[in-house]
Amino acid sequence: MSKTSLHMAPLVLFLLNPTIIFSLILLLLLARLFLSNLKGSSQRMPPGPTPLPIIGNLHLINIKRQDVSFMKLSKTYGPVFTLHFGLEKVVVLVGYEAVKEALLSKGNEFIDRPVIPIFSRIQHGNGLFFSVGELWKHTRRFTLTTVRDLGMGTSLIEGKMLEELNFLVEKISSFEGRPFSLKTFSVAPTNITFIILFGNRFDYSDPTFITLLRLIDEVMALLGAPSLQLFNVYPFLGPLLNPHKMILKRIEETNVILRKYIQASKETLSGNQLQSYIDSLLFKQEEEKNGKKDIFHSTNIISSVLDLVMAGTETTATTLQWAFLLMMKYPEIQRKVQEEIQSVLGSERLPVYEDRKRMPFTNATIHEVQRFASVVPQFPRCTSVDTHFQGYFIPKGTAVIPSLTSSLYDETQWETPYRFNPNHFLDAEGNFVKKEAFMPFSIGRRNCLGEGLARMELFLFVVGVLQRFTFRPPPGRNEVDLELTTEPAFTRRPQRYSTCAVPTF
């Protein structure tokens, strides 16, 4: 061994000591925190609680219910405040006025998405929801045009929904009054999304359909795991944590299925017969080969389809579960909805979306389900430029969380925000009233692109099912036993209750 190697050996052993490594990491993190605070001290960012070393303000946040923590903190720091997620500064917006101003009046300044480690690993900046810049603009514009061409918001997709309603009614009837899981309602809206994506619906017993339902369920549940939130704050701890690894595995299993459909579409693609979103993506990709743009490359195609598989099914499916849980919980409201349905439709005629104008209480109840459930509590944004907002400076690239729940529960906008109350959407004469603070689909340029589809699905499925069935708690439970707390997930999911469906005639 050389003299140099002998002299280097103690240094190598010193650097490999776990205690020394931890101390160096701690020192680097503290230095980053100090420099970050020094950089932002020259201009007045929104106020907030003093961060602790390393963890920032994580000790003040309920990871399972961040929305509740944000509303609580806003009582001390106001509607716009700064939190430290570990070493990362995040500006939180609470209440209807702050959220509306940021997403509408200053929508171009709050248009980007922050880098979130788990979604960066899943999508690598592609797709519909976490892309930015030109890629996002072109992908979103193309998707909106395509789904409209495929019938979203028209009688064509309404007809598909009514067909799916019959399959759902048949499925519920098969239980013959026995208890079944509320998650059963997920099959109908999921199939509507798949019709748009793939061009055809699935039989409920189809193995591929069952597998996709399972994968969606598992990914969304894992995205709400506390240790996954820890990974997003401290990605360097990845080797010590598990949920993100499981998510990536489930995502790859999903992508294997999607690639098969994409390949099958390639083999039968005809520009004169575009039957699905995948067909349209592939046709657009072929068009680009003769031009200079490279927006719809293969990675962006599968990322865009994956976004719609996950987000395009989860939100409406979860809202339906909330709807029938709340009907069980409040039988007097269920009964009033059914009376209105019978007075307008009778027992035989299927509903159409236009019927909502003649069903103010039913329409109000469905809106109240969405408000009360607040299925998507928040979806982070990022400032695209340095901006001034409500007297504060927010630097370019700052993560911003507009709390949608805080608008849906804003005490200045709703008479009884913490109580399920359809009267929130009715005037003194019983007419339906639209409320600006109602923003379950977000607002502005990044609002949910499937909003029109979801509204139609919720009305047709809720009305069509309640026209035929009354929902009650399973034997051994009553209304008081049904808690309206949530399960940890990316969305606010209700508890995994079962229900019993009794025919109404």
Image: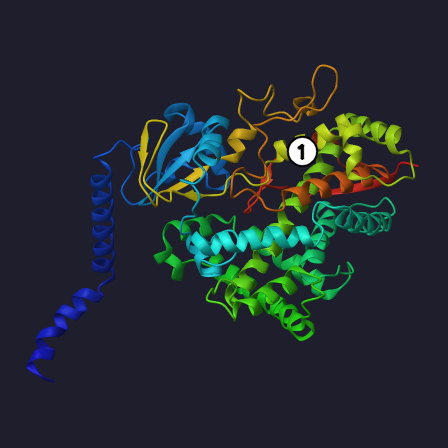
In the displayed structure, does residue 64 sit left or right of residue 320?
A: left
Where is residue 301? Give x, y as percent.
55, 63
Q: What's the residue at 6%, 81% (across, down)?
A: 3
Looking at the rendering, which quadrant does residue 501 occupy? Answer: top right
Q: Which residue has dot 1 on it?
A: 369
Looking at the rendering, which quadrant does residue 457 occupy? Answer: top right
In the displayed structure, does residue 50 sit left or right of residue 464?
A: left
Task: Give the quarter of the figure containing the N terminus.
Answer: bottom left
Where is residue 500? Give x, y as percent.
81, 41
In the displayed structure, does residue 25 sit left or right of residue 291?
A: left
Q: What's the residue at 33%, 43% (across, down)?
A: 396
Furthest-left residue in view? 3
Where is residue 458? Give x, y as percent.
72, 40
Q: What's the residue at 85%, 37% (across, down)?
A: 467
Residue type beneath disc 1: Val
Task: Give the quarter of the figure containing the C terminus.
Answer: top right
Asked if 215 appears above or below 490 in the picture, the reply is below
